[in-house]
Every structure is written in structure tokens, then in C-alpha cells.
Image: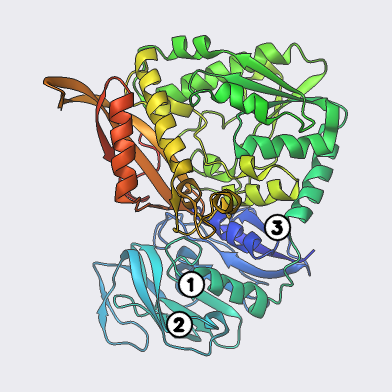
Amino acid sequence: MEKIIIFDFGSQFTQIIGRRLRELNVYCEIHPFNHPPQLDGNVKGVILSGSPCSVRDQGAPELDLQGIKGEIPILAICYGAQYIAYTYGGAVEGCSKGCNNAGATPQKASREYGRAILEIKESDSPLFKGIPQKSQVWMSHGDTITKLPEGARIIASTEDVANAAYAIEGEQTYAFQFHPEVFHSQCGGEMLRNFVYDICGCSGSWTPDSFIETTVADLKQKIGDEHVILALSGGVDSSVAAVLLNKAIGKQLHCIFVDNGLLRKDEFRTVLESYDNMGLNVTGVDASNEFLNALEGVSDPEKKRKIIGRTFVEVFDREAKKVTNARWLAQGTIYPDVIESSAVKGPSATIKSHHNVGGLPKEMNLKIVEPLRSLFKDEVRRVGIALGIKRELIARHPFPGPGLAIRLLGEITREKLEILKEADKIYIDSLCSYMTDMPAASNGFSSASNAAAAGKENLIRLYDAIWQAGTILLPVKSVGVMGDERTYEYTIALRAVTSNDGMTADWVHLPYDFLAKVSNDIINKVKGVNRVVYDISSKPPATIEWE
């Protein structure tokens, strides 16, 4: 099977590159720079990732490109572009040093972070087919290429960096100092398409159906006749994992849905109802008191995650003993969970721990299987549709594994938890009932049928225009006036973002009339709240969750 090999130098965006290629129906494999695979005739091209390191650092990541450079197409991104320049006769410098850009006016080396305008200098480059002469790209580099490698020429620049993109004569070697893979690079997807299709000659035969076929075969081989316990959450990820495993091993799968007390209002009941007629063996376990007692008095979000993880393991340890021949615990873990927790198939930097990533204690005697571990949310949705799962379930917004524990800032009490649940229900219900002409979110789903039924064929639910929405209870009280009395009550923060992958996101410009109504409803209907605010920060620098 044809494939693209991505070498990971430690960038948190490495898997986004893979995700972009899979969107193009091109199969790819990600390998750490220090464990390269043997390349065969099926490898159509190579991509070199970014990195948190500098090529000028002692011990910086290195990759032997012998037999690759000049032999098969290469696209080097950020660190990869600097590595090729540095290794093959060019120069890479920090922003404090003066230098000459090859073929350009002498200037100081310049770092770039955030948005920049790319100006194409070589419009006939196959990389830039169909790309406007100027477009927005995303930069994230503290070093810059101040001298191109031997045989290289500039093919694109920004205002601050002349060598923003280059190509090497006589080779199919191309390099970008920007990140085409991220959400903010407007034409990055088209550039990647040009690379894999026009330069590498890929046919685009990889599909969700092929992923299902391959994964099912792998699961059958890995699990054999042993039994699996799956942690259902009611969300997209665990649901798709359940149906995928059920397709592979059938009755050997035992699904357990735990009420940890941190779910949305009435979610325990509605989730169990949603699995009716899906052919799954599902058991509901009410462990809410166990989780809430363990979290009593805890304010630190990292400690909350660890307590939830430990309690989760304890609950499943008990349930595992009820299942004969249970040897596996399945989870709907997806790549954003992993990349923010630890290095996976590469040296990616850690942002936070995740409540269900990192394995189980030895005494539990259960191995972990995570069939969706390398996929992003929208890829999971594509697989779910291919598996025949109801669109209503597939279109649900992402919901954090630790639940409302990381949306209730500070100490968790049952009183504050009820306040948050009530406010959250009003917010989500309001998003579902408000019709808008905003474009559908990148999850690829809309409420066209609902709109048509309401006689508003050109409108969709506001909920479907948002990638993720949530409600946060802040650990502060403020003065308000309600009736003739002054109050001292809690503040609710609303969050709504649009994203492709969860690793970068922009806040949604919600309609003012919607915000006015939902704010009024929350303050009037939720006792203990007298103020509502809306979060207008993007990721980066702010995360999606507040914690």
C-alpha cells in the first residue's frame, strides 16, 4: 500500500500533519527521528516535522537522509527546513545575529510567531498550484534560515523572513519555515495536497472504510478469544470505539458506563437510552458518590485528574472481576488526549496529564486497547458514519474525560456542581434551539433536517456551528442587584470555539441576542448565579478548558 512517512522531531503538530494527509485519503505513518523504518517501494514521499529544539543546540535531533534526499520527494517543515539548510551548507541563526539571506538584502535574522502573510516568489512551483500569490500562514520559529543550503532557491517569503520557503535544484526537495498543517494557514491543506498528489504521485486510496478493515483485523489478532471491558462515556470517541470493537469481537466485548457524578444533567440516563438497539452489551454503574467523596476538598486541576483516574481504575477493577476471562480494558482515547500527556511514537512535548492516559496499575491485570489512539475527532466521526452510527450521536460536541470537574474551578461541592449542571443545560439547550445562518463547524455535520422541519431550510442549529461549547463555574462571587436586594453570588463563564483538531481553536462570535437571552435565562433560573461572562480568547494562548 502506498504511503507517506512522517519523521517526528518532537513537534506537538506532527500528528496534525498525519491527520491532514488522511483527510486527503493518503495513508501515512509517523516514526520518531531516532527510529526510522526501512523504506521500501511503497513509500511515495517523506515529511520532516517541526520541533521544540534548535538545530544549533548540542544534541539536537538528527536524521540520516542518505538514500532519501534526492531519491524520493521531501517536504521539510519548520525545524525540518532548518535541519536541511543547516546540514547541507546553509546557515541557521538566532534573531540576535546579523546575517545575509541568500539572494536577498542583508538583514538580521528574524523569529516569527503567529500569523504572517506568505508571498509566493515562484508561482510555477508545483507546491503552489492554485494558491494565491499572498495568503496567511502560521509561523512558530525562534531561529531562521539566513543562508540557503547548496543548490537551493527561494520560492516564497514573508515580510520578515526572506527564506520562508525554498526548493533544491535537481531534487524534489521542498522546505517551509511555516506550518501548513495548522488551522491558521489558510492554504496549507492545498499545499499538502499538491505535495502528496502532484509531487509524490499518491492515488488517495485510504478511506475510513480501509481504516475499519485494517483495525478490525488487527483487533481480532491482538485480542483473540479474550474478553474486553470498554469504558463508555456516551461521547463520540468511546461510542465509535465500542462499535469498532463489537465488529471485531462481538460478545467478547462488555461495555460499562460509569456515572462519576461529573456528567451533564440527566446524562447518565440519556446515554444509556442512546445505546438501545445498537447491539452492544452495556451495563450502567452509579459510582457518583465514590468519585465526589474522593474529590472533596481538592482544588488543583492536576490532582482532580489524578483522583478521577485512580477512582476510575478502582471502579473498573471491581467490574473486571465480574467478567470471565477479561484481559483487556478498552478506551476511546484519541490523539489530542495523548499528545497533551506524553510522547507517542515520538518525542513530543508534554502539556498536561490526562486522566485516562498512561496505563493501568500492574495489580489490575488488564491490558489497554485504544483503537482510535492515532485519530483526531473529525476522523473519528468519519469512521463512525462509515460504521453506521446514528448521526445524532456522532455530531455531539467533545466533552472532557474528567467531566465537569475541570469546568468547576476550585473545590468541588455538590451544591456548586448542581449550579453548574443547571447553567450548562440552559446553555446547551439554547444552542440547540437557536437557528442561524452561520456555517457548520468542521465536524462536518449540520441540523439541516431540523431546520427544514421548522421551515428554515437555509438555517442550522447554532450548536452545529460550534466545535465545542461548555460552561464554567468560577471560584469567585461578585455583587449584584436582584429586585431590591444586593446579592453576592457566583459567576458563570460561557465558552464556544471552532476548531479542526482541538489543538488550535478560535472563539465563536455568538449572536448578541443569543448571548443576551441565555445570560438572562441562567441568572433567572439558576439560584446562586448573578453574573454571566463570555470567553473570547483563542487557543493558543488560552486552552479550550479553563481548569
Report x, y in % for residue 216. Answer: 81, 43
Determine whether, in the image, residue 28 is placed left or right of residue 259. right
Residue 351 visible in this rendered orientation of the protein: no
Q: Give the spatial CA distance, label 1 vs label 3.
A: 30 Å
Q: Looking at the image, is mark 2 or mark 3 nearer the viewer?
A: 2
Residue 338 visible in this rendered orientation of the protein: yes
Which of the two labelled residues, at mark 2 and mark 3, occupies the earlier sequence position? 3
Q: Tell me: residue 260, above or below residue 71.
A: above
> Amino acid type of disc 1?
Cys
Mark 1 touching mark 2, by CB under 8 A? yes
State which quadrant residue 143 falls in: bottom left
- Secondary element type, mark 1: loop
Q: Tell me: residue 148, above or below residue 419.
A: below
> Amino acid type of disc 3?
Pro
Which of the two labelled residues, at mark 1 and mark 3, occupies the earlier sequence position? 3
Residue for badge 2: 132
Q: Tell me: residue 324, above or below residue 105.
A: above
Of residues 29 and 319, the one nearer the viewer is 319
Report x, y in % for residue 470. Answer: 41, 37
Q: Circle 2: is it few (<14), some (14-19), or many (20+) Cα within 10 Å?
A: few
Residue for badge 1: 187
> Amino acid type of disc 2?
Pro
Q: Give the spatial CA distance, label 1 vs label 2.
A: 9 Å
Residue for badge 3: 37
- Secondary element type, mark 2: loop
Which of the two labelled residues, at mark 1 and mark 2, occupies the earlier sequence position? 2
Q: Circle 1: is it few (<14), some (14-19), or many (20+) Cα within 10 Å?
A: many
Mark 1 touching mark 3, by CB under 8 A? no
Report x, y in % for residue 89. Answer: 46, 78
State which quadrant residue 295 falls in: top left
Farthest residue in the right direction?
225
